[in-house]
Amino acid sequence: MCSPLCNDVDTIQAKSVIQGESIGNSPGVACTGFSNKSLIGTTSLGLGTNATQAKTDLDVAVHQAAEAPQSLSLTGVDLGGLTLQPGVYTFASTASIAAPNGQLTLSGSGVFIFQIGSALGTSLNSQVLLVNGTLPQCVFWLIGSSAVLGSGCKFQGILMASASIGFMDGASLVGAAYAQNAAVTLTNNVITVQPACNL
């Protein structure tokens, strides 16, 4: 499955690098701003392409993540400073790593699903740290609207946003970014795509 990093329009600014996978847009036929970026993979645009299959696969993944039974509600809780085990964590509205340099630690082999009612935001230089066998491809972030990763943020997991995903200057992602109905915007970022979760 190629990574539909752009859905309607993808804006890539400065020197962003996407490693290990493709970018795509379906049903759109354009991704903009490629002159200063590096893609180690391929581009798939328009209907009848790999991007079309990726969008279908994304719809299935979003449905499965939304239907997963809740382990714990974290509504109103800042993720910064927490250590969580595999499970399904829900937020009625927004989720965030709010404190600058905040760190969320995910520990243990298994699947993590974050069901976020509206937006996801991370602060300056925050990070998601994976320990004790946690794999970035098995961490799913289901976002009801948009996500913004703050400058210098080191994020991990599969971002699946209903609307846009924005990467501020220097933010990085180990995983993948999927925007269903808007753009993924990159500014001097590194995205390292991982193989599928097989747990």
Image: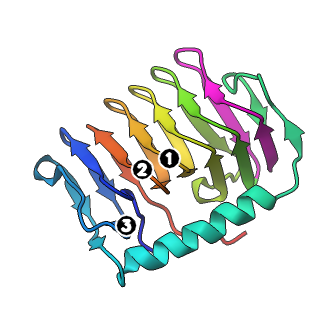
Secondary structure under the numbered disc 1 in the rendered image = loop
Q: Is 77 included in the stretch rendered in magenta? A: no
Q: CA distance from mark 2 to mark 3?
A: 20 Å
Camera-near label (2 vs 3) is 2
Q: Residue at x 20, y 54 (%)?
A: 38
Looking at marks 2 and 3 on the same chain, the residue that comes earlier in the sequence is marked by 3
Q: Left or right: where does residue 54 sit relative to residue 119? A: left
Does the rendering let one see residue 80?
yes
* Quadrant including the C terminus: bottom right
Secondary structure under the numbered disc 2 in the rendered image = loop
Q: CA distance from mark 2 to mark 1?
A: 5 Å
Q: Which residues are magenta?
A: 85-108
Q: Left or right: where does residue 119 sit relative to residue 2? A: right
Looking at marks 2 and 1 on the same chain, the residue that comes earlier in the sequence is marked by 1
Tell me if residue 172 comes above or below residue 19 in the rendering.
Answer: above
Labels 2 and 3 touching (C-beta < 8 A): no
Q: Residue furthest bottom?
A: 48
What amino acid is at disc 2? Ala
Q: Dot 1 corresponds to which residue?
A: 163
Looking at marks 1 and 3 on the same chain, the residue that comes earlier in the sequence is marked by 3
Q: CA distance from mark 1 to mark 3?
A: 21 Å
Give the x, y percent position of residue 165: 44, 43
For disc 3, the neighbor class at 10 Å (few under 14, some 14 to 19, many from 20) is many
Camera-near label (1 vs 3) is 1
Tag shown at residue 21: 3
Tag shown at residue 182: 2
Q: Is 91 included in the stretch rendered in magenta? A: yes
Secondary structure under the numbered disc 3 in the rendered image = loop
Labels 2 and 1 touching (C-beta < 8 A): yes
Give the x, y percent position of residue 23: 33, 64
